[in-house]
Amino acid sequence: MIVEHDPGRGSVPERSGGRTCSVRTILTERSSDGARHGVGRPHLPEGATMTTTPTIDEFRAEVTAFLDANAERKPESKAFRWGEGDDDVAMFEEVDPETEQRSLQEAKAWRAKRYDAGLGYISGAAEYGGRELPAAYDRLYTSLEGRYAVPDQSYFGIGLGMVAPTIKDHAQPHIKARYLPAMYRADLVGCQLFSEPGAGSDLAGLQARAERDGDEWVVSGQKVWTSGAQYSDIGEVICRTDPDLPKHKGLTGFVVDMHAPGVDVRPLRQMTGGASFNEVFFNEVRVPDDHRLGEVNQGWSVALTTLMNERASIGAGGGGGGMGLADVTRLSQMLRHFGADDDATLRDELMRLYTGFQVAKMTNQRALDKIRSGQLPGPEMSIAKLALTQNLTGTASFVARVLGPRLTADTGEWGTYAWGKFLCGTPGMRIAGGTDEVLRNIIGERVLGLPKEPGIDSVSPFKDLLKN
């Protein structure tokens, strides 16, 4: 999917509105700004506290009042008609750096307003700025906010959907107190730093290293396929800390300052023409030991926490575009417009797609309800992610069969060439969050109880294994 490093955007793009200061400086500025509330101290409706539980109707009224006062309701959506409106169906949103920064600042401002109103961490612990309300309240807020025109919140999907839950489960208490409120208020944006050029699906084969130096660790190595690194303030990184141990047992997780000296973020150009991902180089970056996630050499369990949340996020539609294409209306009207609606094979393929998306949606909801009830995500999230990529791949195949050569040249005809970016972006979803092949192995071994894949050496020291 990636064909080259993009030198046009520079080796170290501006991040966080052009600032390159440390995370500590960002948090200090935040706490000293008299116009802002202190970390973990949102304002609540009169008579409410961080530990009171309003009825669902009271909460609905509170959320509606907040949204009415701070955002405009979306106009009623019109029924989809072929040839009307924007025909953009790209898998990944690709914008220039200036537009991205402007959109990011608007998204941060909205998130901060939510948090300060007590609606930024609805189900979270009160000590970290949360309301400690049941998951149903979180879902209600999301449903109500969807009726209003608010800034794009996808910038926080990885940080809040994957990194923050890992910090909550594995960080030391004072690190949770420092970062969780700041992340849910969008003072800090997080990214995930796992994959490497020689360790993607085989994450346990990673070679980025962290060496102990007193109360600090020195991190060196390369990560790749990192979404949002160009605007992130912190990152969750997994490093090799003991090459004398087997590959799964010599890893340790850390929270790293993305503005620290030695961190180099470089964009990667995709075959879609955009640059939605990055490679990140660490050149002797110093990380305090209290920023360690979990115990030394126990980073595999930390990584699994993040990966399960990642698959839950992607499987539920939080990891990219294309989810709206599950709407059979767009695809069925395409079929009619191009005179292919009498093709029984294509009609059958269309309904298989519709059924696949609907079944996946219900399966995802069941799994997400389990997570929101406080249970750890399990291998069922691998099913959700695999189902998504199969449905998207099926959609790409269907569209290609209907449009044929119209996909390859831009004639200006509505709803034809625009699908090219979707088709070029779909293969990336088969890699992100675990390849299809790895997910099938997980399902086979952990769900169906099949024997483990042969040839995986989980005994020999990592230093003695062949490297890519």
Image (cartoon, rainbow, N blue to C red):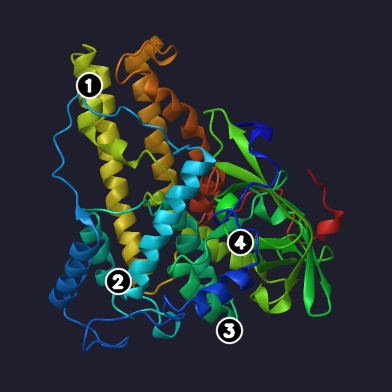
Q: Residues within 10 Å of mark 1 (few under 14, many from 20)?
A: few
> SS class of the residue under badge 3?
helix
The quadrant of the picture occupied by the N terminus is top right
Q: Is residue 343 above or below residue 71?
A: above
Would residue 381 be seen by someone viewing this image from the given angle? Answer: no
Determine which of the numbered discs, if any, sits on residue 135 in the image: 2
> SS class of the residue under badge 1?
loop
Residue 233 location in percent, x, y? 59, 61
Position of 23 compared to 183: left or right? right
| Mark before the other along the chain sequence, 2 or 3 | 2
Where is mark 4, residue-wise? 235
Where is mark 3, residue-wise? 174
Please tell me which residue is depicted at 30% across the width and 60% down the height of the picture: 366
Tag 4: residue type?
Gly
Q: Do the numbered discs 4 and 1 sit on residues whose CB atoms are within 8 Å?
A: no
Determine which of the numbered discs, if any, sits on residue 83 in the image: 1
Cα distance between the residues tagged 2 and 1: 40 Å
Q: Do the numbered discs 4 and 2 sit on residues whose CB atoms are within 8 Å?
A: no
| Mark before the other along the chain sequence, 2 or 1 | 1
